[in-house]
Structures are given as structure tokens and as C-alpha cells.
Image (tube, rainbow, N blue to C red):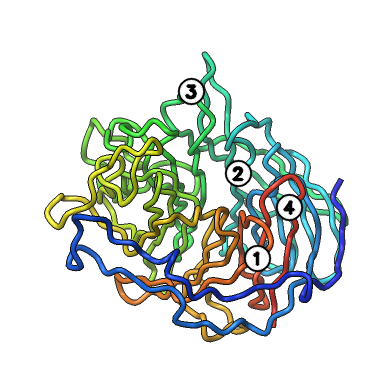
Amino acid sequence: MARFMMNTLAHSLSLIALASCAGANSVDSGSSASEMTATTAGEDTATPDWTISELATLAEPWAIEFAPGTDMLFITEQAGTMKFIDTASGLMGSVTGIPQVDYGGQGGLGDIVFLPSEASDTISDRTIYLSWAEAGEDDTRGAVVGRGMLSCDGAACAIEGLDVIWRQMPKVTGRGHYSHRFAISPDGEHLFVASGDRQKKQPAQDLSNTLGTIVRLDLDGTPAAGNPFASRDDVPDAIWSYGHRNVLGMAFDESGRLWEIEHGPAGGDELNLVEPGKNYGWPTRSYGDEYNGTPIQDHTPDDGFEKPATYWTPVIAPGDMIIYSGDMFDAWQGDALIANLKVKALVRVALDGDDAREVARYDFTNRLRSIDQGPDGALYIAEDGEEGRILKVSL
């Protein structure tokens, strides 16, 4: 059962900006400075004078998202339930109409997104998109995307007419690397979906399937016109980019460019500027190694793959990412804010053209699964785990 609380945790949660180089880019042996620009963490070492408030404790929160135009924060729980919090009044309730999910490992109920074009001060009768893991035949699974209509009345909300509009193909065995994160294009016309490699590696280099890709869809789930491989009969029309491993955050910058954050293997977590038709190298190239210690060849200038804008060795294990655009933390406008699982920190990355560098790291008590920007510019963060707290970070 969710437990609603509004006690301030500014003293119990000590957040310290780390200036350590341990999380900065580590250029592996055989790389050269000309291949990519390594960054140095800790340019901004000042701990923000912020307040941390705990809004609720939920069971394995996975994604958080504000309904545009409102103070209503919606939260998916991985096992297949969904809650909401009215962050203005403190009202908390449940959402019905959730699909059956294949829960286990990294699978279950995933991301949420709403259409900015439907922003309104009323929560009812708006489109909602959900992702989740779906069971198939012969012990296989895959991520799917569903679209429905959300209506709310007091402490109860319901999703009606939820239909699957896209499926990750093929379904495979295992319960890892679904990715299934969303981003809506700035013009409000397209839905981008991250499709992980499902821990199968080589399909990310095989354009006959959608594993290890980012796909670009129209709002009804059909492949969008103008996708880079639409003229090829042997490639799914929806593919926008490929060679990805496990994308767990996507966001558009103020120039309308798409960025994504993804898990590397043992080393080599990546932040990439996503461009149509480009191949990002996995599993042929990586700044990490296999978990058993087997080396993976680093990127080289002439390898034909897109290089990350920045990367992390040791890993940070990103859970989610936004690009900040609010006024509350005005000095951070245009920066990527990454919620992380392994380092239990909020990592801030400055974006400058095609380049990126980590500039600060703020320590939290627990693993961080998801992040969103509130309508007032405050940050909302979901902790990972069976008792994951929903935190508000404000000045």
C-alpha cells in the first residue's frame, strides 16, 4: 500500500556534489584524444541549497510523468500497477485499466507519456501512452506500446480503450534490456520509442528486426513518413537509429535534437546525440568490455559508427534522463540531468553543440530510477526498489 508523506528530508538526505574523476570519461588504452573529447566531472562543486520533500513510498516505481498543464504526477509500478499524486493538494489515488504485464527481471509496466498538444487544467479525456513487457509463445517476451484515453474523478483514474499500437520484434527469451522509454517530438507529431537489444547483442546490428533500435512512429503507432530506411523492403519502416544496447532515457533539447542515455556492459555507459539512419556500434564497438573481462574493441575514427558524445567508465547505470528547461534551477537550463542506479546520484551534463561533459554529481541515499521536471521547475525523482520514494527537489 502506498504511504503518503510530506515530511521534509533536507537534513536526512545529504546531497553532496562530487568532484571526483572516478565517474568522468575514461579513455581506454588504444584510444586517442582526437577520437572523442573526454570530460572532467566536478566543474560545479557547490551543493545546491535545495529542499527534498518525500511525497510517497511506492512498490518498484519505474516511470514518472506529469500530465501537461496540471500538477498531476503519474507513476508506473513495475509489477503492473499505477498511481498518481496531485502535487498541489497532496491527493493520491490509483489508476485502473492497466494491461496484464509480464513481470520479472527488468520486465513489467514501463514508461508513460502524454501529448503536450492536449495540455489542459483538467485531467480527463486525454491520450495516454504506456509501455510494458508482453509474454509470447515458448517462453518469449517483448516490449509493447499501448494507447488509450485517461479520465479521472477525484481519487480514481481509469484508462479506457487501451490498444497495443506497436510491438518490439521479434519476441525472444529472457527478461532484460526492454528499454521501452518514450519521447514525443517537439512538434507533437511523432512518438519515439527505445527498443533494447534484449541482451541478445547481434540483433542490434541486424536491420531485419527492431531490437537495439530507436523507432519513430506516428501517434497512432504506424511508422512515420520520412524514416531513413523506409525505401528498403528488408528493413522495418519504423527504425530511426540502431546499434543501441539498453536505452533508458531520451529527451529533446531546445534545438529539437534527440539525446539518449544507455547502459554499456562492464564500462562504457553512453550519452548519444541521435541522428536518423546512424549506427551507434553495439555490440561491435564499445568503450566497455564483456562482463567476463573479454575486451570489446573501442571506437576508432574510421570505424563507420557514431561515437558517444560522452561516456562513463566506471559506469553510472543510468535510469532516466531529462533536459532541464525550467526557471527554478535557471543556471541548469539546457543541461541533461541523469538519474542513476549504480552511483546513487543525479549527474548533470552540460550540452554544447554536439559535445557533452559531466559538470556535477549530486549524491542521494538510494538508487534513482526516474526523473521528471514539474510545472513549477522543481525536480521529481523516483527511487528504485520495493520501497521507492517519490521525492520533490526544490529551491
Residue 69, picture quadrant: bottom right
Q: How far apart are marks 3 and 1 (CA)?
A: 35 Å
**Image quadrant in which the N terminus is located:** top right
| Spot occupied by residue 160 in the image (x, y as percentages of width and height) | 71, 41
Q: Is residue 23 or residue 185 the one in the foreground? A: 23
Q: Residue at x 57, y 67 (%)?
A: 346
Which mark, by number, is residue 388?
A: 4
Which mark, by number, is residue 347?
A: none
Which residue type does callout 4 highlight? Gly
In the rendered structure, the answer to whether residue 61 lies left or right of residue 175 reads right
- Which tag, 1 or 2, sits closer to the chain's start? 2
| Residue highlighted by disc 1 | 364
Other-residue count near label 4 (Cα within 10 Å), few / some / many at <14 / 14–19 / ≥20: many
| Residue highlighted by disc 3 | 173
| Spot occupied by residue 27 in the image (x, y as percentages of width and height) | 28, 61
In the rendered structure, the answer to whether residue 254 lies left or right of residue 80 reads left
Q: Residue at x 35, y 59 (%)?
A: 272
Q: How far apart are marks 2 and 3 (CA)?
A: 18 Å
Kind of element beneath mark 3: loop
- Residue mark closest to the camera, 3 vs 1: 1
Which residue type does callout 2 highlight? Gly
Q: Distance between the residues labelled 1 and 2?
A: 23 Å
Kind of element beneath mark 4: strand
Q: How far apart are marks 4 and 2 (CA)?
A: 15 Å
| Residue highlighted by disc 2 | 110
- Which tag, 2 or 3, sits closer to the chain's start? 2
Kind of element beneath mark 2: strand
- Residue mark closest to the camera, 2 vs 3: 3
